[in-house]
Image: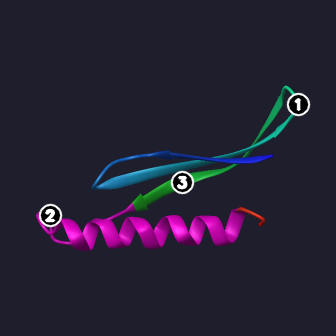
Amino acid sequence: MRILGIKSGLQRTGFDIIDAEGERLRYVASGPIATAEAPLRHLPARQKIIVDGIGEVVRRWLRW
C-alpha cells in the first residue's frame, strides 16, 4: 500500500510518500509545496497552489 502524508502550512506544505508491505515501510519521496509566489495575505491563491501541488504529487506518485 502506498501512503501519502501531508504536513500542512500556508507558506510551505510538505508531503511524504511511503510504501507499506506488512510491517515493512519503505521511503518513496518527500518534498515541499511552496506558495511564496502568492501574496502573503491572499489565502485563495495560496490554497490553489497547495491543491494543485497535491494534485501533481498524486498524479506522479500514486497509482490508482
User: What amino acid is at disc 2?
Assistant: Leu
Of pointers 2 and 3, the one earlier in the residue sequence: 3
- Residue 30 spot, x, y in % from top left: 60, 50
Residue 58 in magenta?
Answer: yes
Instruction: Using the numbered discs, state the Cα–Cα distance from disc 2 to disc 3 in whole angstroms.
Output: 21 Å
Can residue 61 be seen from the camera position used here?
yes
Query: What range is drawn magenta here?
Result: 34-61
- Residue 56 spot, x, y in % from top left: 57, 72
Under circle 1, the secondary element is loop
Residue with the mark numbered 1: 22
- On the picture, is 21 further left or further right than 44? right
**Secondary structure mainly formed by the magenta segment:** helix
- On the picture, is 63 further left or further right than 43? right
Of pointers 3 and 1, the one earlier in the residue sequence: 1
Front-most of residues 7 and 1: 1
Instruction: State whether residue 37 is above or below residue 2.
Output: below
Q: Residue at x 31, y 66 (%)?
A: 47
Residue with the mark numbered 2: 40
